[in-house]
Image: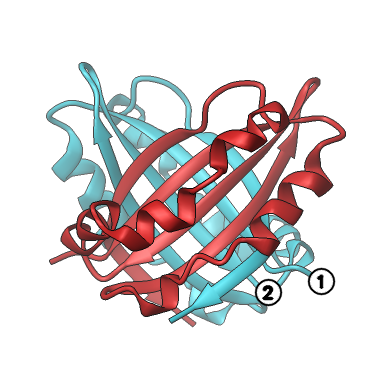
Chain colours: A cyan, B red
Amino acid sequence: MNPFIAMNRFHVRRGSEADFEAVWQSRDSHLRDVPGFVSFQLLRGPEHNDFTLYASHTRWASRADFEAWTRSEAFRQAHRGAGGNRDLYLDAPHFEGFEVTQELTA
Amino acid sequence: MNPFIAMNRFHVRRGSEADFEAVWQSRDSHLRDVPGFVSFQLLRGPEHNDFTLYASHTRWASRADFEAWTRSEAFRQAHRGAGGNRDLYLDAPHFEGFEVTQELTA
């Protein structure tokens, strides 16, 4: 069973970066209590003309753990009110799931 | 100083996935010897009609550590011969650099 990384990519309007980060900072995701959760990172990427690319990475012990979470009450709670922040983005977040196939640590 | 993730995205031709993974498996990157190196992952993402998306993630203690590596002899050695694998891809790899702005671990 490969570890799994759930990634969402966000096109955040220029000028809304601080508001976007504050939304994540204040979010109470309860991820630590979810079986198979390994780690979460919010990543700030390159700036473009009309947006700054952000990505959220959530690492799970397996794809099955991630899928179980998306069907859980904890998932619904974590995403409650997410629609209220729609004006921070140019378009809808883009989801991509990845399996870790090779790994090296220092 | 935020941790830094250097990501490359690869559009690997359908049918070339095993060859692509073998190239990475056999690569002797010496990353473990490089100052500021934290971890590396090769990620297999969604399948599309004519390619499978892969991403390489390399985590560094800081963007400056990553940039120092790109100017080093170790970097040149690790990428030697990379052009010989061009037929595995639909197009050139796409680089994106990210700073870790928030983080949570289990």
Q: Is residue B42 visible to the viewer in this orientation of the structure? A: yes
Write down the residue under mark 1: A1
- In the picture, measured across the screen, residue B50 lies left or right of residue B79, that is right
User: How far apart, in angstroms, are the residues tagged by discs 2 and 1?
Assistant: 8 Å
Q: Position of residue B11 (x, y in %)?
A: 64, 30
What's the chain of the residue with tag 2?
Answer: A
Q: Is residue A93 above or below residue A54?
A: above
Q: Quadrant of the N terminus of chain A?
A: bottom right
Image quadrant where residue B27 sits: bottom right
- In the picture, measured across the screen, residue B87 lies left or right of residue A80, that is right
Tell me if label 2 and label 1 are in contact, CB under 8 Å.
yes
**Mark 2 nearby-residue class (10 Å; few <14, some 14–19, many ≥20):** some
Furthest toward the top, the residue is: A49
Q: Earlier in the sequence, mark 2 or mark 1?
A: 1
Task: Give the structural element (helix, strand or loop) at label 1.
Answer: loop
Q: Position of residue B17 (x, y in %)?
A: 79, 42
Residue sitting at x 40%, y 45%: A55
**Mark 1 nearby-residue class (10 Å; few <14, some 14–19, many ≥20):** few
What's the chain of the residue with tag 1?
Answer: A
- In the picture, measured across the screen, residue B95 lies left or right of residue A14, that is right
Write down the residue under mark 2: A61
In front: label 2 or label 1: 1
Residue sitting at x 33%, y 27%: A89
Q: Position of residue B3 (x, y in %)?
A: 26, 65
Q: Position of residue B97 (x, y in %)?
A: 32, 45
Q: Is residue A27 visible to the viewer in this orientation of the structure? A: no
Q: Is residue B88 above or below residue B27?
A: above
Image quadrant where residue A46 sits: top left
Task: Check disc 1 and give the amino acid type.
Answer: Met
